Amino acid sequence: MKRKDENEQGTADKGWLKRRKMEYHIPQLQHKAASDVENQVVSRVQKMGSHIRNCVNAVPNNYKLNLRLSELFSEISKLYKECPLNDTDSWRSYTYTVISGRFRYLDFEVKDTTESLKRLQKVKGFGAKVIAQCKEYFATNTCQIIREFNKDPMRRGVRNMIKIWGIGPKKGAELVKLGYSTIEKIRQALACRKLLLEKNALVGVQYYEDFQEKMSRDEAQQIGQIISNACWEQYPDAEVSIMGSFRRGNDSCGDVDILIVHEKFNFTTPPGAIDELVECLRRRGHISDHLTHVNKKNYNIDRSSHLPTSQMYMGVFISPITKGKKRRIDIKFYPYRERAFATLYFTGNAHFNRSMRLWANKQRRMILDDHGLYKQDNFGKVLKHERVEAKSEKVVFDVLNLVYREPRQRDSFDAVIEKGSSKLEFIENSKKLYS
């Protein structure tokens, strides 16, 4: 929700981002900027020759078989993400997500024919293993890898554990090895004091079912309105927006992600603003639990003014629609000059963001994040003083020479489109990565 109207401009231009370097397909296996990821696979790929092929439309297709295959590989990606057992699973989840999105942009319909599958094999990312999985799907309407995941007790247990908010893959695997493979077993062990978990994980256990259930857009909007009203009492001219899947137009949301900016606070944010807002919401019975510390330093400090820059909070909100239901919320307060970059970043989706950051880094020699767009010198050093000023998201797209994409269009890695192109040019030579 916004007090000030923002006109988002779109464009009918069509085109595809040209990718010439394989860094575009590096997964973020560790907590570091996507553009900084380095591994041996990338080094090998960089040494290969490239055979460029145009295979993709600038707009999503409506081919039914392609959409079904997209859903299949999206499910496989989700399984690797939710049931990770080794370091390569995150990479596989990422690559299958890219493949899933790519099916929706192909300029032909994939059919169960030798000619069609040979044509598909020419598209980057569709190696022997993926082609075999397509054939299997055509024959059985499913895929062996999905059956294996569903039968594997270890993977099923890890999936159950990491669905608990506050528990990651490593801790989830530890719990399964200790014999805790379901939420019921976790609750029994906690009741008998046989198991100890950190505070956030305990909250995740308590509201396990609620956090798994997605809320309607209406409920997300009502939560956003409550937070907005409380914010405006202290900062009447603040712009308060709901980000994430809500802004992308999804019918349901897993949580509510709120972004606040205020024109008066251009370089910093008011000290304690988030804590005051959260306390106000708590007193009025809207917040039940904190997932970040309140009255702690949940913000970064500007070195020159010693005032906070961005501030953030995560917590549990009591549903205004369904009695007793609890919902996850994130609230962020950013300096006004960063609003375009924060809006872009927190709209998502994650793969679209990664693609934009890699494009900025590899094609424009710039660093893009939620705070700004910066130039780099010849040695890769970020020039903080050479920061691009942007009053809207469209300016960021223009500077990067990308077609502006409406929030609902930011659905995949390949939705990032270079101006003046008609198709995305894929590099053929990386098929082994997917085989």
Image (cartoon, rainbow, N blue to C red):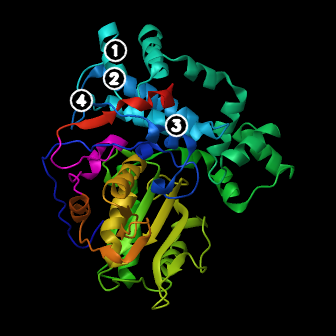
Label 3, residues with CA under 10 Å away: few <14, some 14-19, many ≥20: many
Identify residue for label 3. 93
- Of mark 2 and mark 4, the one earlier in the sequence is 4
What SS does tag 4 mark?
loop
Q: Residue at x 51, y 74 (%)?
A: 278
> Badges 2 and 4: C-beta atoms under 8 Å apart?
no
Q: Which mark is residue 61?
A: 4
Q: Secondary structure at mark 1?
A: helix
- Of circles 2 and 4, the one toward us is 2
- Verify CB contact (< 8 Å) between mark 3 and mark 2: no
- Label 3 residue SS: helix
Q: Amino acid at mark 3?
A: Ser
Query: Marks 3 and 1, Cα distance to the nearest angstrom?
Result: 24 Å
Q: Is residue 402 magenta?
A: yes
| Residues in magenta, as a range | 401-421
Residue 394, x across and y down, in percent: 21, 61
**Marks 2/4: CA–CA distance:** 18 Å
Residue 45 visible, this angle: yes
Report x, y in % for residue 155.
Answer: 67, 32
In this figure, which residue is indicated by the disc labeled 2? 122
**Of the residues under marks 1 and 4, which one precedes in the sequence?**
4
Is 431 situated above or below 235?
A: above
Labels 3, 2: front one: 2
